[in-house]
């Protein structure tokens, strides 16, 4: 038996084994590294897509929350929200002007999409006692008239 006959099967075995390990490692990276994928939450009347806000600086007490509703099949109303992470309250806002009084509810009509955006309808977390960190997600509780309570995880930044 020559050295070639002895080494060739072992070399093939190690190449196949290392290739399998590489494939498994790549699959693991694909599964674990999904920060850019939107969060979807399914309610009775709609799908809530990617709730987010910007990270806050020390001393900043307010943060705007944005998301969109899609596949709206029936009318509903957002009655309120709460943020259990050291905040005084969450207000429903009609636009960027914080001098305008908060809304008591936001009507949601059936249709394709409803956007909660920085320049329009959004939620305003008020009275933060700690900054919102860029490397975390935070729970947000939304109360709807028809769809009930929906607990979502709000991510930092607006990138889908």
Image: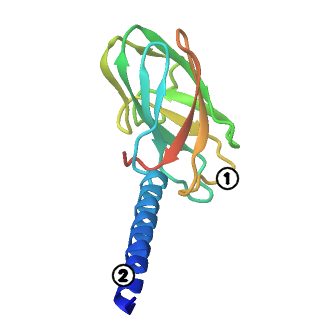
Question: Residue 156 — which label?
Answer: none
Q: Nearer the viewer, residue 74 or 2?
A: 2
Give the CA separation, mark 1 to mark 2.
Answer: 63 Å
Q: Is residue 100 visible?
A: no
Which image quarter holds the C terminus?
A: top left
Residue at 34% across / 19% down in the picture? 71
Q: Nearer the viewer, residue 129 or 34?
A: 34
Q: Position of residue 57 (x, y in %)?
A: 56, 58
Would you say 158 lies left or right of 79 here?
Answer: left
Which image quarter holds the N terminus?
A: bottom left
Residue at 40% across / 45% down in the picture? 37
Q: Nearer the viewer, mark 1 or mark 2?
A: 2
Q: Is residue 62 visible?
A: yes
To which residue does mark 2 refer?
A: 8
Vertical side of 27 occupied by 121: above or below: above
Would you say 10 lies left or right of 153 here?
Answer: left
Vertical side of 9 occupied by 150: above or below: above
- Give the residue at the far front of this rendering: 1
Within the image, what quadrant is residue 24 found in? bottom left
Within the image, what quadrant is residue 125 found in? top right
Residue at 49% across / 40% down in the picture? 64
Label 1 sits on a secondary structure element that is loop
To which residue does mark 1 refer?
A: 130
State yes or no: discs 1 and 2 in contact (Cβ < 8 Å).
no
């Amino acid at each position: 038996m020559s050295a070639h006959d002895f080494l060739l099967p072992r070399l093939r075995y190690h190449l196949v084994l290392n290739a399998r390990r590489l494939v498994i490692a790549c699959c693991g990276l694909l599964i674990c590294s999904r920060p850019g994928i939107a969060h979807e939450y399914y309610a009775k009347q709609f799908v809530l897509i990617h709730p987010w806000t910007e990270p806050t600086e020390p001393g900043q007490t307010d943060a705007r929350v944005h998301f969109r509703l899609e596949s709206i099949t029936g009318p509903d109303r957002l009655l309120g929200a709460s943020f259990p992470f050291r905040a005084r309250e969450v207000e429903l806002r009609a636009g960027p002007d914080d001098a305008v009084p908060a809304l008591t509810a936001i009507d949601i009509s059936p249709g394709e999409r409803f956007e909660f955006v920085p320049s329009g309808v959004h939620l305003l977390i008020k009275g933060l006692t700690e900054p919102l960190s860029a490397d975390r997600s935070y729970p947000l509780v939304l109360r709807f008239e028809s769809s009930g309570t929906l607990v979502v995880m709000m991510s930092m930044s607006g990138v889908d």
